[in-house]
Image (cartoon, grey):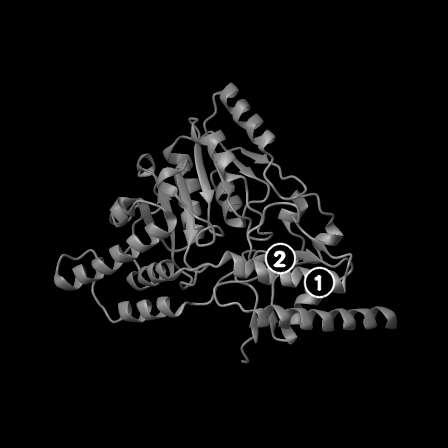
Amino acid sequence: MTRPAVYLDHNAASPLRPEARAALLAALDLHGNPSSVHAHGRALRDVIETGRQRVARLAGAETRQVVFTGSATEAITQAIVGGAKAFSSGAIAMSAGEHAAVIKAAEATGLPLWTIGLDGQGRIDLDQLAEILRRADEKGVTLLVAVHWVNNETGIVQPMARINAMVGATRHTLFVDAVQACGKLPLDFAASAPDMMAISGHKIGAPAGIGALLVKGHADIVRLIPGGGQEQGRRGGTESTAFIAAFGAAAEANSFDSAATTALTQRVETGLRAMVPEMVIFGEQAERIGNVVNFAVPGLGNAIAMMGLDLMGLSVSSGSACSSGKVGPSHVLAAMGVDKALCECALRVSFGWNSTREDADAFLTGFETLLARHKRAGQAA
């Protein structure tokens, strides 16, 4: 099978970093169980704890606050399902633009779901959050508030400082999905308000299959998999030493260049605007992370566009990769008030650690070809 020439879907998964690959292979040469007290076990334990220290530094967390999981989805589920049980939550409050993993975990609790709306630029409605907190206090309901820091589809950065101030000082529990923020924005988990935070390995150049839940001291009781007491009793199951080593190496090697990736997205946006003045960039007026453009050309369906670009060796997406591979309307864009027809035209281009100007230019060349074919097809019809 021919490999795609240009990869433009880093928000789904970033390619494996050379440092992560080297750490992964080195750890695979070790054998034993990291919970064993003999020399082989201690060698594995040392690798795990080194990985934990590296991930903690990237996230601004204390080493003991890092709980390794099999994925960010598991970390999210542990935080929400486990957290709701641990803290006797009476309801889950979450934004309308949350990742599917957050939505499904919230539904799995069986608790009432209180939804916080988005404005037209994709920002969480802080007035509505304040009203939900007021109503919960009035009713004596303890909330587990779940919000994302950076939206995976649009790249919109939420006003986390204000959310922290609103929820952090209350009796309610705050969980933050920081999967798209980790490695791109400065994280200071230890000193910030969230009680729990989820991060992922494969978004920063580690292999898929490793994530972490960051927990404050009072959240140590949050468990989902009791098992045999691994991860300080917070997540059972023998740790994947090799994947943890790779996660740590990727965290240490992380050098996200916001200026460079922003230059790439601006190049793409400028080029698209020149081709199609009526093109829409979602969340254009909001603060956005610098590596992603979510846009739509009215009348150009994303299913057709993605197939056409794929045939040209250009890998892009229509949004989240975690919706069973479906191509269709985005619940995030719908929550922003985007009409269904335009939602079905949305495409996402995202850059990462190994993206280049040539990648951006290849996309623009391919998209121009796609538009010309689309125009000819329309004329023929």
Q: Residue at x 59, y 63 (%)?
A: 264
Q: Where is mark 2, residue-wise?
A: 293
Residue that badge 1 annotates: 272
What is the spatial separation of the Cα atoms under label 1 and label 2, in whole angstroms?
A: 11 Å
Residue contact between numbered discs 1 and 2, judged by CB atoms under 8 Å: yes
Give SS at disc 2.
Answer: strand
Quadrant location of the N terminus? bottom right
Q: Which mark is residue 49?
A: none
Apparent side of residue 351 relative to residue 340 in the rendered image (left or right)? left
Rendered position, 320 above or below 309: above
Task: Describe the element under mark 1 as helix, strand or loop.
Answer: helix
Of the pair 56 and 320, the residue shown nearer to us: 56
Image coords of residue 94 (percent x, y): 53, 38
Q: Amino acid at mark 2?
A: Val
- Residue kind at label 1, given as amino acid type: Leu
**Is any atom of residue 285 visible in this view?**
yes
Tell whether 274 sits left or right of 262.
Answer: right
Furthest toward the top, the residue is 138
Q: Indicate the position of residue 99 as horizontal and vertical percent values.
A: 54, 48
x then y, percent, for residue 334: 67, 46
Please report the residue visible at 69 percent of the width from the left and 61 percent of the height from the top.
270
Q: Is residue 56 left or right of residue 186?
A: left
